[in-house]
Amino acid sequence: MNQISLVIPCFNEERTLETCIRRVMQVPDFNFEIIIVDDASTDGSLGIARRLEKKYPQIHVLSHSKNQGKGAALRTGFKQASGDFVAVQDADLEYDPMELKKLVAPLADGYADVVLGSRFLSTEPRRVLYFWHSMGNKFLTFLSNMFTDLNLTDMETCYKVFKREVIQNINIQESRFGVEPELVAKIAHMRLRIYEMGISYKGRTYEEGKKIGLKDGFWAIYCIFRYNAHNASLPLQFFLYLLIGGFAALVNLFILFRHKAKGVMAEK
């Protein structure tokens, strides 16, 4: 039986961490190595993780002395993974660990190197939440696909499952949520066999603890450019330069008109 290293980045998830682990442990016929990486939580998450580590021999807890972000937590966890396959599981309850069985199957059967779970392909239940958040996700996926030449439907998904040698050969540079477009860019450039499967999704509201925000969306755009532009086709690189040049021109025009407006006001 293949061993699955499940890396769980955790920051202030004391309300959901134990339930998440219990659901993972209920997945039948799986040989799990569970790596919880506490990213300097300020609540009781680390204490809960340590208690679970004592209870279950397959759980290993790592911790950061200061908060660095999801990407840094994954970087720490991936380095310690020893299983045949490596998967990501958020510490909240948005994703159902039971679905890891179907995501691992293409890897175990030998015809995939990476499998991504898509929240937009599934006929399974998906909680209805923010319209603009969904549109932002689709825009980021579209932009990523333009540069990677993949046809993904959900680039920002948490559920990414890798062969261990694949993920441990990737140098992760992003420390926060930019890790998602970075990983997709790098697996695309490695010319791997990438599969996508539908998954259910029980998203959280911001009141319930959702952390990703608008600034993370802008950073994701930057990461898509940063990790893909050098490999993009010449027409796409030309388009990118036009886009950056146009944006810079608009900023300069805004500054110029602002200075002129201030000069007119001063004369009055």
Image (cartoon, rainbow, N blue to C red):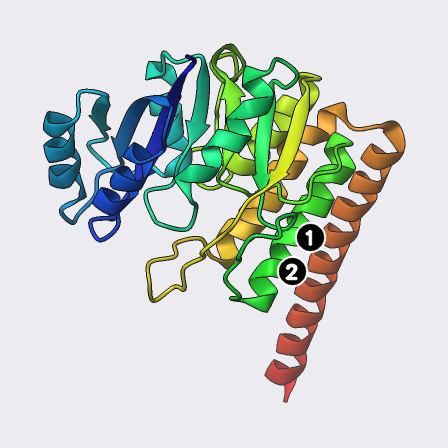
- Which of the 4 quarters of the picture holds residue 90? top left
Image x and y of residue 34, in percent: 29, 25
Disc 1 vs disc 2: Cβ atoms closer than 8 Å?
A: yes
Image x and y of residue 57, in percent: 17, 20
Is 146 situated above or below 13?
Answer: above
Helix or strand or loop: what does disc 2 sit on?
A: helix
Is 161 situated above or below 139?
Answer: above
Distance Cα–Cα, label 1 vs label 2: 6 Å
Q: Residue at x 67, y 52 (%)?
A: 138
The mark total stands at 2
Q: Which mark is residue 1?
A: none
Image x and y of residue 146, in percent: 78, 39
Q: Please identify the quadrant where the C terminus is shown.
A: bottom right
Image x and y of residue 39, in percent: 27, 37
Which residue is under mark 2? 135
Q: Residue at x 60, y 65 (%)?
A: 132
Determine crowd level at label 2: few under 14, some 14-19, many 20+ residues with C-alpha closer than 10 A: few
